[in-house]
């Protein structure tokens, strides 16, 4: 063991906070090193000198002053158990506000719009393909002819097989 | 049955104000003395001690016994004391032990080297000279000595308060006591007629 190793172990040695093996190493070194032995003695003497500093007592009103300050602290409210952390409360409030804001924005979903348009186009297809409906639907007879030629004789709307063809 | 500090603090967390009073009674004097040795002003030390207890009270709902109560208590006290010392030196920058700093930086308060020891002893008594010499140590060395010598904390706890390893702490303590040995050499060879008999047994 070298002097610099002892310097690192000197405080635990003087505190008697090292195991017997470490203690033996330090003592072996000190047996052969007068400088380290002298330093250890001086440190012991120093600690005695440091003990001379008297302790002070807190002033008489210390406790009363602290009690008054503690009493002036804001009391926890009934809902405080819900919000143990002010930061958590703030985060939740912001999340709620963001959710409300998002809910007010109309959803623009191109896929959904296209799907709705497709549905509009085919939703009456079943009706149009129903022969009975078309033949008995009076309103169809009121429709103008396919060609705007007023001189031509009006086609018989009751015969769907004509299909407006030749 | 005596409750541990952690149990007392958990009771405070549960709303038991009496447990807070017990913690105050137990640590009021050690805390005021530690802070007095840090800032060397009684009124400031008491104000800071009040602030420490108030911060403990305010943090009661978030208290989690992850470390010893005294580690938490003295860590708060150390940070407040260092801020106070630095504020008094008109350095408004907020500081913390979490910020790495060279512990061998210039001492916060330089000892009156130009004053001969016998002159100083005429002006002040021995204990004031010792206090002044301790206060002249670099910040981390000072905190380490106060917690080791006067609060008799173990290395692990002091290391946690100072946010360093136990090995680094042992080296720090050696350098601190070596500085004190040099500064207080005239007193070390001159025993006092009356000794207060306080702190770690030597």
Image (cartoon, coloured by chain):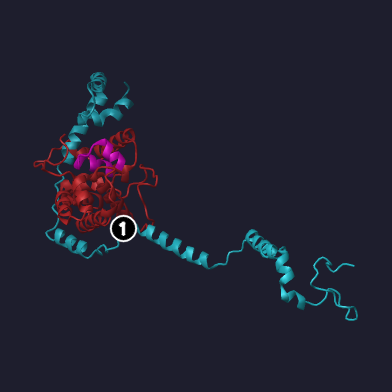
Image position of B181 with respect to B41: above or below: above
Q: Position of residue A39 (x, y in %)?
A: 24, 29
The quadrant of the rendering that contains the N terminus of chain A is top left
The quadrant of the rendering that contains the C terminus of chain A is bottom right
Q: Position of residue B74 (x, y in %)?
A: 25, 47
Image position of A1 with respect to A88: above or below: above
Secondary structure mostly taken by the magenta-highlighted segment of the chain: helix
Q: Position of residue B4 (x, y in %)?
A: 17, 43
Residue annotated with mark 1: B88
Indicate the quadrant where residue A153 lies. bottom right
Residue at x 25% of width, y 32% of height: A11
Q: Position of residue B136 (x, y in %)?
A: 28, 47
What kind of element bears circle 1?
helix
Residue at x 85% of width, y 74% of height: A155
In the picture as drawn, the residue positioned furthest to the bottom comes out as A151
Residue at x 65% of width, y 60% of height: A115
Quick check: is B146 in the magenta stretch? yes
Chain to which mark 1 belongs: B
The colour applied to the residues of chain B in this rendering is: red
Among the chains, which one is cyan?
Answer: A
Dot 1 crowding, Cα within 10 Å, few <14, some 14–19, many 20+: few
Indicate the quadrant where residue A79 lies. bottom left
Residue placed most toward the observer, B50 or B69:
B69
Can residue B138 be seen by looking at this rendering? no
Can residue B108 be seen by looking at this rendering? yes
Q: Which residues are magenta?
A: B143-160
């Amino acid at each position: 063991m070298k002097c610099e190793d002892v310097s690192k172990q000197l405080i635990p040695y003087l505190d008697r906070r090292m195991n017997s093996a470490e203690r033996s190493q330090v003592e072996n070194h000190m047996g052969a090193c007068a400088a380290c032995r002298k330093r250890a003695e001086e440190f012991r003497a120093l600690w005695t000198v440091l003990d001379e500093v008297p302790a002070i007592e807190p002033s008489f009103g210390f406790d009363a002053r602290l009690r008054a300050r503690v009493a002036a602290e804001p009391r926890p409210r009934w809902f405080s158990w819900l919000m143990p952390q002010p930061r958590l409360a703030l985060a939740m409030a912001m999340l709620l506000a963001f959710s409300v804001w998002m809910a007010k924005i109309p959803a623009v979903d191109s896929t959904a719009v296209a799907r709705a348009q497709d549905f509009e186009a085919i939703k009456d297809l079943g009706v149009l393909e129903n022969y009975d409906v078309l033949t008995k639907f009076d309103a169809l007879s009121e429709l103008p002819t396919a060609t705007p030629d007023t001189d031509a004789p009006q086609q018989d709307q009751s015969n769907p097989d004509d299909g407006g063809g030749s | 049955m005596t409750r541990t500090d952690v149990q007392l603090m958990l009771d405070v967390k549960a709303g038991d104000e009496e447990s807070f009073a017990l913690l105050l009674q137990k640590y009021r004097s050690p805390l005021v003395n530690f802070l007095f040795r840090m800032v060397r002003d009684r009124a400031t030390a008491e104000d800071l001690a009040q602030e420490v207890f108030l911060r403990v009270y305010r943090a009661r709902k978030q208290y989690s016994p992850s470390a010893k109560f005294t580690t938490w208590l003295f860590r708060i006290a150390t940070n407040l004391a260092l801020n106070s010392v630095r504020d008094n030196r008109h350095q408004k920058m907020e500081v913390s032990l979490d910020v790495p700093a060279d512990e061998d930086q210039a001492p916060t308060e330089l000892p009156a080297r130009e004053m001969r020891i016998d002159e100083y002893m005429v002006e002040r008594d021995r204990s004031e000279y010792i206090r002044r010499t301790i206060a002249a140590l670099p910040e981390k060395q000072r905190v380490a000595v106060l917690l080791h010598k006067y609060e008799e904390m173990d290395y692990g706890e002091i290391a946690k308060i100072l946010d360093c390893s136990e090995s680094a702490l042992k080296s720090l303590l050696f350098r601190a006591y070596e500085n004190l040995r040099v500064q207080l050499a005239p007193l070390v060879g001159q025993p006092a007629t009356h000794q207060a008999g306080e702190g770690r047994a030597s």
